[in-house]
Amino acid sequence: MSSLRTLAESLGLSVTTVSRALDGYPDVSRKTRERVTAAAEAAGYRPNAAARRLRRGSAEIVTLVLPTAQGRFNEPLYIELMRAMGEPFAKAGYDLTLMASPPGEDELRTYRRLVEGRRTDGLIVVRTRPQDPRIEYLLGTDFPFVVMGRTSAQPGIFPFVDGDGEQGFADATAHLIGLGHKRIAHVASPANLNYALFRRAGYERAMTAAGLTPRVVETEPDEDGGFEAGRFLLPTADHPTAVLCGTDRIAMGVMRAVRAAGLNVPHDVSVIGHDNLPASTYSDPPLTTMELPITETGARLAEMLLARIEGASPEGMQEVRPLRFIQRGSTAPPKL
Amino acid sequence: MSSLRTLAESLGLSVTTVSRALDGYPDVSRKTRERVTAAAEAAGYRPNAAARRLRRGSAEIVTLVLPTAQGRFNEPLYIELMRAMGEPFAKAGYDLTLMASPPGEDELRTYRRLVEGRRTDGLIVVRTRPQDPRIEYLLGTDFPFVVMGRTSAQPGIFPFVDGDGEQGFADATAHLIGLGHKRIAHVASPANLNYALFRRAGYERAMTAAGLTPRVVETEPDEDGGFEAGRFLLPTADHPTAVLCGTDRIAMGVMRAVRAAGLNVPHDVSVIGHDNLPASTYSDPPLTTMELPITETGARLAEMLLARIEGASPEGMQEVRPLRFIQRGSTAPPKL
DNA sequence: TTGAAAGCGGTACCAG
DNA sequence: CTGGTACCGCTTTCAA
């Protein structure tokens, strides 16, 4: 309600002076500033965001667009990411908002609206695909954005932070081999999710290096997908003694399939996931898994995006970070 | 980039005409309209959101502020809620955004910024407390908002949709009693969460009605809290044969405590939760639980908020809906 | 059917 | 140190 003008009138000052006093410009007398801030406080004055944006040409907002195909994604992760990024952005004067959008055509339209309507000052892209139309679009503008994850075949340079899924899955595979496993399967997320490619490659590399034959089943990255994959892999006598899963949710499904087949985790079949969901600590048995430490990732992404908004070049803003391996109860040496 | 003015200049028309042509006013010749829309399309014109907002006095945004205390909440639920509300809002021309905020002082400041800076046109409040300062604040303005959940001791009338936790927990208790259970405990969320009060009241009502003695343990509404509560309840010989939990996450922790005590779910101890998390279908055993159907809830809340923004009275916008009971494998008759 | 012009509420340049 | 004033880009009244 209270605008700069009414505030100025009530003080007998000009809007100019009031504006400057509130924005902390140095060229206002201390006494005036104090009077103004007190009055603003008393009147509960907040600048009209739209007016300010129009004038300053900046929305003071950064946006994470979350693709939301039914139940497919790991939502708590993104809320955690929001938490991690919230503070640096707030400190820099930006509101961090999340918009949900079904993937596909509409998603690109959402990006266009945001960018071309200047509804936001920067974007955080998540859930990358190997060749990602959102990133393609953004690279064609010079709009500031950062990516959690990577792409595989994208021309152009952009800031990202990603976990080293290739190395992480190679290490996990080697870990299983070290325990004595030979028949190790990989239940992979669909190849149209970029992380799936890296994780699979790491698994295959480690298997091949050990002279073992990779066996990959591709499935939806949720519990149902894992369950089906498990039902497919387990019935035979020479079933895998260990299953490396693309995500924790897949792993949950696989563990259930193991039980359904009358087998035991980890005694008959070891299971490893990725994401370290809250539920994974409390599954039976607790799930061995790995994760990209999200707090540091978020902080770094925020830093990068703020730098890009300030005009910094994306050069050198590409970071692949090691995954943290979390040993729990779902892995053990194979039965002899 | 392309503004109304540049567009108008390139067409040799006035901004007035171009604006009206694009907004579908009837008083523009068909030929002009076609020329204008084609040119706008070609130039990739999007109206500057800030300018439009300033002029129209509406942000075309509605906001859900998600309180995010570390790990305490059921985030997938809110993403589902966003999905459910997204379409009705989009159809009405509003962007639905989510902002994460740590509860407490800062949260209220967030609300103030949004409301007084006119950064949004409407708010969705979740995770209500019995006497909720956010709702108190909003009731003091005439700003449009809706609530998922209720309060207990709030003066004033506002739109909400909530699950009937009182009846749901009474029914669940009666269900357990029907199975033959007599020693039924309730692991409740803290009393500063409003839903905890209703659920507890329902449990106590059903117990008392059956002539049984209620036994309530209060704990943090997550797996750790459930685990601790379980460890507290289970060691004695006359431990409860059934535990009704305030949330699924509590139930997960309780189930783990049951296993840790060398007991079996549901054979020795039945467990029931609330929320129907994705993980609950895949726990071992799958968790018996209940839920507020979220799609309909979201649709209704969106409808209410749009009506409020249009100036409708909140009168009659209070809905308490029955919970859906989901019978799974974590409940059984008690051992004799 | 079209155009000129007045703002929406701030910010920032310029002058005093 | 303070005030006048020209915008930011769009919508909308009023006049032609």
Image (cartoon, coloured by chain):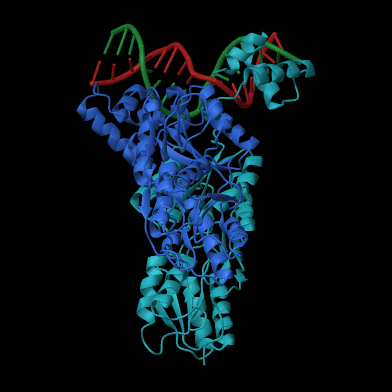
Chain colours: A blue, B cyan, C green, D red
Taking B285 as reference, is A21 above or below it? Answer: above
In this view, the residue farthest toward the right is B30
Query: Is residue A80 among the parts visible in the rendering?
Result: yes
Q: Residue A283: percent from the left, percent from the top?
A: 46, 65
Locate the N terminus of chain A and report the quarter of the image it occupies: top left
Q: Residue at x 54, y 22 (%)?
A: A140
Q: Nearer the viewer, residue B335 or A64?
A: B335
> In which quadrant of the rendered view does residue A280 lie?
bottom left
Q: Nearer the viewer, residue B54 or A217?
A: A217
Q: Residue B129: percent from the left, percent from the top?
A: 43, 62
Q: Nearer the viewer, residue B30 or A182?
A: A182
Taking A69 as reference, is A32 above or below it? Answer: above
In this view, the residue farthest toward the left is A30
Q: Residue at x 47, y 60 (%)?
A: A271
Query: Is residue B152 among the parts visible in the rendering?
Result: no
Taking B187 as reference, is D13 above or below it? Answer: above
In this view, the residue farthest toward the front is A211
Q: Residue B288: percent from the left, percent from the top?
A: 56, 72
- Left or right of A320? Residue B6 is right
Q: Residue B152: percent from the left, percent from the top?
A: 47, 66
- Left or right of B31? Residue B262 is left
Taking C16 as reference, is A200 above or below it? Answer: below
